[in-house]
Image (cartoon, rainbow, N blue to C red):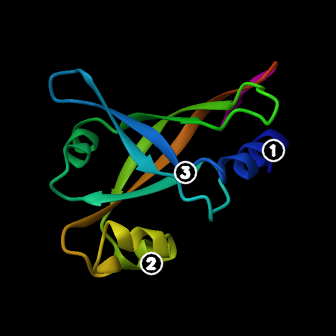
Amino acid sequence: MDMRLKFLSDNMRAIDFGMLSTRTEGGAFASRPMSNNGEVDYDGDSYFFTYEQARTVADIGRDAAVSLTFTGAPGPRGQPPLFIAVQGNADLIRDKTMFAAHWTAGLDHWFEQGVDTPGLVMIRVRAARIHYWNGADQGEIVL
């Protein structure tokens, strides 16, 4: 694994939420917070759960190009936080076996019936390009 990707994976564990942006039917951008699963090693793929009727699912069905943004906490001495911007493509997954492979107990808060929740959809975002800023250090990872 690229050392920069390993660094991002390790540091993304402390970031609870990110923003997932899609393009709407009218061409505007729509963004919404999504829970970042810090229990999973980040390898360029991100997984999120939502409901079939969510606008996010319709947007991705029309245009798979998406972006993700994450912001870490400021450092203990006021250092700037870690910023991450991901460009990629999303897939809609409706396979319960895949749900189970990416499920964590915290998801039960939003989806009370777990992987058997009616209308459950998993979104997989496959990163194509990742930009990051960590104080004076910045870079780009192309996957």
Residue positioned 30% across, 70% down in the render:
111
Residue positioned 81% across, 44% down in the render:
2
Nearer the observer: mark 2 or 1; the answer is 2
Q: Position of residue 137 (x, y in %)?
A: 82, 23
Nearer the observer: mark 1 or 3; the answer is 3
In this orientation, which residue lies closer to the viewer: 81 or 90? Answer: 81
Residue positioned 76% across, 26% down in the render:
78
- In reply to whether residue 141 is colored magenta, the answer given is yes
Q: Is residue 21 left or right of residue 7?
A: left
Which residue is identified by label 2?
Answer: 100
Marks 2 and 1 in Cβ contact (< 8 Å): no
Q: Position of residue 58 (x, y in %)?
A: 19, 44
Which residue is identified by label 3?
Answer: 16
Q: Residues within 10 Å of mark 2 (few under 14, many from 20)?
A: few
Which residue is identified by label 1?
Answer: 2
Q: Which residues are magenta?
A: 137-143
Q: Amino acid at mark 3?
A: Asp
Asked if residue 139 shows in the view, the reply is yes
Q: Residues within 10 Å of mark 3 (few under 14, many from 20)?
A: some
Q: CA distance from mark 2 to mark 3?
A: 20 Å
Q: Amino acid at mark 1?
A: Asp
